[in-house]
Each structure stands twice: as C-alpha cells, then as structure tokens.
C-alpha cells in the first residue's frame, strides 16, 4: 500500500519560467514558500515505525554482542538494491569492470524493483541504490527513487558520473527527490583519472556535475546532495588540494577521500598509495595478506548483519557488498518472503559464525566494517 508523500514539505519547481513558484505536492497547489533549506539526514527516523525499529535493532545487537548469540529483534535500517551489475567502465579492481563477476549480469526494471521494495518492511530508513555495476545504465532509475522516497526512505546512489550530461534527465532525478548523489571521480586530469576509471572521460564527468548543480540551483532544491568521492591511489595521492579546488568550482556539497580496497586482484598493490596515512592497510601478515587497520571498539565483530542487507539485481539476498558473486545468498526476494530470509536459518547461521570470529569467512578479511581509515578526509562546503 502506498504511504503518505515522502516529505510533507517537499516542493518541486514547475517549469523554467515560474522558478519562484513551487508545486506543494501535498496540497497539490502552487506555493511561493521556500523548499527545505537543509538536506534531510539519513540518521534521523522520519516516523514512529522507523524509530521503534532503530531501538529494536540496537537492543538486539547489544544483546547479541553480550550473549554471543544472534538476537535479531529489528528489521534492516539500511538496504542496498543493485539496479544493475553491468557497467560502461572497466575499473581494474572492480569485478564488474573487469568482467570477473560470475553471477548472471542483468538489469532491474521498475516493476521488479517495486516487487522488491513492497516486500521490505516499511521501517527501512535508507536505500543505497547501487552495489556492483553502474546504476545510471538503468533508464527507470528516477522512478525507482521516487517510489522509495514516497515511502519515506532516504535514497542515495553512487555513479561514475557519465550519464548526467542531459539536463532533462537531471531534472527527472531532482524531481524524484534523490537525497544524495555520490560521484566517483579519482583524478584531476584525464591521464591520472583513466588509470583507474578505464574507458572514462573526465570532461564528461565534470560537465555532468556542473549540470546537476545548475539544475538544482534553477529548481531551488537542496537535494540531491552532490558528494564527490575520490579514491586515494598511488597515481592521484598528490592531487588532494587540486580536487578540493575543482570540487568547489563544480558546485559539489561534499568531498570524501576514500581509501583503496585491494580485493583479490593480481597486481592490485601497484595502486596502493605510498603515503601510509592514505591507506586502510597495515603491513602484510605471515601468510602474505594485507591486514586492515581496525578501530579498537568491536574490532572482532561485524555489526552490519544486524542493520543491513544487500539485494542483487536478480533478487538474490547477500549479507553485504563484499559477497560480490552472491556466494552466500540467503534467498531470493522474487521467490521468498522478506521474513524467511532476514530471520531465516541461513542468515542466522552466518551471524552466529561471525559472532565466533570476525574472520570466520574468508570474504570478511578485506571488509571495510569498523575500519580506521575507510575515509581519510572529508570536506563539506555547506
Ligand atoms: C562498484 S561501485 C558501483 C557504483 C558506480 N559504478 C561507481 O563507480 O560509483 C561502488 C563504489 O565502490 C567504489 N570503488 C570502486 N573500486 C573501489 C576500490 N578498489 N576501493 C574502494 N572503493 C572502490 C566506487 O567508487 C563506488 O563508490
Ligand atoms: S564505474 Fe563503478 S561499477 Fe563500473 S567498473 Fe568502475 S567501480 Fe566498477
């Protein structure tokens, strides 16, 4: 069943010629009142079901850590849905870009997305609309965003920024009320950029970012927050200040400098920055594996399995985004109910094993949960 419109204050510009007036979606009439002055926070529940769920998740998690057995009292707070596993680029440390992803490559369409979202509990607070692949290859992405926003879910998506050049489709995105747009951009010039974003065109990404900030201004909207994400690597580690300057000029709201994940790729070390402050890894252990730097608190626990889950574009449910190939699939939302997956035996066993040891599964060795240096530096312009 459809719920109340996302934000009661959510207002849309109606056309270029009446930019001072906005359509109040609730009242269905024109208004000259200002749209929300500040972007919404994903961390503040929007209604009592989200609040109660947050309390249940926290309680279950605390009890599980204390008793060392999985108590799951709440539903996920955050859900990843993968619009597609296909991509237009060939980033060398990404299984989608290298073609090493073994699960079936496909795209979600809106009706399939709706089946998934309608099966999820209405207490979900945040939707991360990406996993592997490039979300903007899916034409119906704005419809998906709008549908989730109408359920009062905070929506964020991550893109390589190659499909933002058309002002009309950017307007659709803003009208859909996307909360956050993360744009991956790891170089201040084409030569540096394409060392990782192979097949990419930096000018086109710059043009796209400018476009989004211009359309937002024209429509007098604070959403989507434009979040530039720069992965620190050996070839670009000297460009931090340059990118801070470029980000400001392009009109982005935030920049995050993210540390590189190596994965299982041959020759990956070649991309590691030589500045130790910029990496998530310590020296290698005696087996030759890089060890990640963890925070002291809960360093041997994975909390993620109590508050989030990943749904791939084929409907398969994975514990997290590190299960790239869906090897630990707990079920499929096109066939199974949400409860039979989230509270089911397979998920429970996985949580149980991780309570025994954070490194029970090999996949978890390189995971970013609880990392000290996931983000090396973050800047906000607003
Ligand atoms: C697999 S991508 C999919 C979304 C989109 N295609 C993109 O690149 O933004 C998901 C996220 O992983 C990031 N990413 C890609 N390779 C990475 C690596 N080796 N280490 C850390 N993050 C990485 C991307 O920048 C993006 O934020
Ligand atoms: S753009 Fe994103 S999905 Fe595509 S290859 Fe690069 S990291 Fe992977």
Image: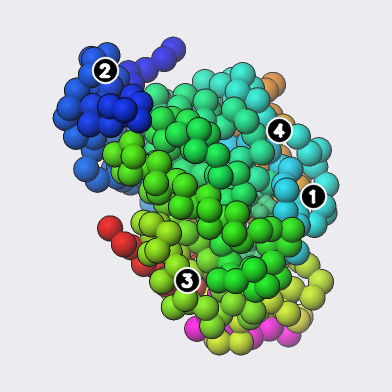
Secondary element under disc 2, as helix, strand or loop, is loop
**2 or 3: tag closer to the N-terminus:** 2
Ligand 1 visible in quadrant? bottom right
* Residue located 71% across and 70% down the image: 195
Q: Which residues are magenta?
A: 277-286
**4 or 3: tag closer to the N-terminus:** 4
Q: CB at mark 4 closer than 8 A to ligand 2? A: no
- Residue beneath disc 2: 26
Q: Quadrant of residue 272?
A: bottom right
Residue 243, disc? 3
Nearer to us in this view, 317 or 73: 317
- Residue beneath disc 4: 107
Q: Give above or below for 274 relative to 43.
A: below
Q: CA distance from mark 4 to mark 3?
A: 33 Å
- Residue beneath disc 1: 101
Q: CA distance from mark 1 to mark 3?
A: 31 Å
**Rendered location of residue 160, percent (x, y):** 60, 53
Mark 1 residue crowding within 10 angstroms, few (<14) / some (14–19) / many (20+):
some
Left or right: 202 with respect to 11? Answer: right
Secondary element under disc 4, as helix, strand or loop, is loop
């Amino acid at each position: 069943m459809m719920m109340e419109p996302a934000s009661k204050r959510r207002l849309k510009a109606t056309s270029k010629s009446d930019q001072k007036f906005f359509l109040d979606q609730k009242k269905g009439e024109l208004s000259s009142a200002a749209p929300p002055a500040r972007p919404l926070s994903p961390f503040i529940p929007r209604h009592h079901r989200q609040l109660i769920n947050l309390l249940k998740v926290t309680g279950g998690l605390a009890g599980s850590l204390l008793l060392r057995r999985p108590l799951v009292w709440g539903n996920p707070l955050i859900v990843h849905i993968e619009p597609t596993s296909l991509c237009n680029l060939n980033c060398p440390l990404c299984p989608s870009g290298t073609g090493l992803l073994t699960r079936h490559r496909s795209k979600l369409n809106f009706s399939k997305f709706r089946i998934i979202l309608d099966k999820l509990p209405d207490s979900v607070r945040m939707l991360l609309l990406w996993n592997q692949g490039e979300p903007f290859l899916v034409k119906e992405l704005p419809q998906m965003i709008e549908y989730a926003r109408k359920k009062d879910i905070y929506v964020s998506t991550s893109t390589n920024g190659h499909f933002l050049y058309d002002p009309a489709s950017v307007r659709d995105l803003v009208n859909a009320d996307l909360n956050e747009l993360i744009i991956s951009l790891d170089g201040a010039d084409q030569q540096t950029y394409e060392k990782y974003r192979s097949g990419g065109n930096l000018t086109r990404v710059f043009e796209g970012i400018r476009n989004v900030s211009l359309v937002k201004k024209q429509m007098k909207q604070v959403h989507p927050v434009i979040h530039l994400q720069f992965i620190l690597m050996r070839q670009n580690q000297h460009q931090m200040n340059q990118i801070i300057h470029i980000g400001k000029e392009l009109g982005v709201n935030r920049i995050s400098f993210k540390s590189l994940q190596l994965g299982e790729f041959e020759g990956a070390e070649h991309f590691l920055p030589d500045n130790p402050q910029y990496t998530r890894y310590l020296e290698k252990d005696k087996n030759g594996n890089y060890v990640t730097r963890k925070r002291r608190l809960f360093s041997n626990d994975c909390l993620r399995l109590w508050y989030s889950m990943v749904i791939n574009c084929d409907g398969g449910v994975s514990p997290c985004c590190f299960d790239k190939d869906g090897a630990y699939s707990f079920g499929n939302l096109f066939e199974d109910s949400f409860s039979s997956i989230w509270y089911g035996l397979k998920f429970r066993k996985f949580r149980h094993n991780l309570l025994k040891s954070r490194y029970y599964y090999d996949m978890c060795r390189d995971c970013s949960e609880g990392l000290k240096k996931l983000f090396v530096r973050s800047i906000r312009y607003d």
